[in-house]
Image (cartoon, helix red, strand yellow):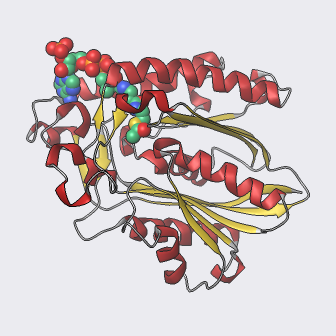
Amino acid sequence: MYSRITGTGSYLPEKILTNKDLEAIVDTSDEWIRERTGIRERHVAAPTETTCDLAEQAARCALDAAGKHPDDVDLIIIATTTPDKVFPSTACLLQARLGIRGCTAFDLQAVCTGFVYAVGVADKFIKSGTHKCALVIGAETISRLLDWTDRTTCVLFGDGAGAVVLEAGDEPGILSTHLHADGQYEKLLHVPAGISTGFAEIQAESAFIQMKGNEVFRVAVNTLGRIVDETLAANDMQKEDIDWLVPHQANVRIIQATAKKLKMDMDHVVVTVAEHGNTSAASVPLALDTAVRRGDIKPGETVMMEAFGGGFTWGSVLAVM
Ligand code: ACO
């Protein structure tokens, strides 16, 4: 029994915030942001738009692409760091909107690696034979976690959602998933505020993303290099066997370093960071859907997805489309 991606979808909020727009908000420049990150613009959710709103649009789009009706879905996983509510989970909110009753639904939190983790979990549900059709979504309104006076973080992130339908089948699909974490790195990338640490007394600055960018950068490049090797070795594959790399879209320099490790031409690496910024858990499925809809990634091709994020967490998915 295998699981296979049978449809992809995505959604971006209407409002676009360019680097030029940011120049009016913080002491930064279009040139600095483009040179250091590759980002030109990002989408930002409207004040009334929530993570579930974005997730719903992406989910419906993926269901259409897979030719599936909501009633066919027996598992919903939403990877998000920015849920609509403390509870119920955003997956339960989405389930109600889709009019599905009774199926398994939960959120998963692994920050930027969330979607890769969620595919890993859904794949195991399907392989075990308990579930047949999963809706796996990465959705974020990460703009709500940004201090818009902190130029070291607010220029990096954007909002959006991406989704896949994973179905059970006899042919391989997902070949392997590799999920890792090391909590020793908590303080390099975190939002200090939380629920059990004093929800009612949250101080403004502790409710926003804090990141030691250059230290995160160094660990990310090394770690993603290792996950590429691990994924190839687990499948007894060579670098040349990979048709497409779909990396987490945090920084084009990190993406280029991973592509170099794979000896992969950049025209076989999906890069959407210029238009999306870092959308955390939404970044990989957004990039995947963009490449599928452009007709770049074709059925039968082998795709390596990888991500790195807060925790630290990191992981990969190797899939035949
Ligand atoms: N505009 C202008 N100057 C800036 C800005 C800005 N927006 N931000 C920082 N600077 C300045 C700094 O103050 C510093 O100035 P100084 O030399 O006078 O002190 C200078 O630019 C260089 O700063 P660095 O932080 O060393 O710049 P670096 O080249 O490392 O780039 C960046 C910063 C883009 C954040 C990079 O380190 C990075 O991409 N890190 C990894 C991010 C990542 O992958 N995160 C993981 C996923 S996110 C998640 O899980 C939620």
The image position of residue 143, as x and y in percent, is 28, 51
Q: Is residue 228 left or right of residue 56?
A: right
Query: In the rendered image, which quarter is residue 250 located in?
Result: top left
User: Vertical placement of 6 versus 27: above or below?
Assistant: below
User: Vertical placement of 225 versus 2: above or below?
Assistant: above
The image quadrant where one finds the N terminus is: bottom right
- What's the residue at 22%, 30% (across, down)? 152
Can residue 290 be seen by looking at this rendering? Answer: yes
The image position of residue 50, as x and y in percent, is 34, 67
Ligand 1: quadrant of the figure: top left
Q: Is residue 240 left or right of residue 252?
A: right
User: Vertical placement of 264 versus 70: above or below?
Assistant: above
The image position of residue 22, as x and y in percent, is 16, 40
Q: Nearer the viewer, residue 321 or 120?
A: 120
Query: In the rendered image, which quarter is residue 176 located in?
Result: top right
**How many circles with numbers are drawn on the protein?**
0
- What's the residue at 8%, 40% (across, down)? 24
Q: Is residue 205 left or right of residue 288?
A: left
- What's the residue at 73%, 69% (across, down)? 133
The image position of residue 89, as x and y in percent, is 47, 69
Q: Nearer the viewer, residue 289 or 136?
A: 136
Can residue 35 be seen by looking at this rendering? Answer: no
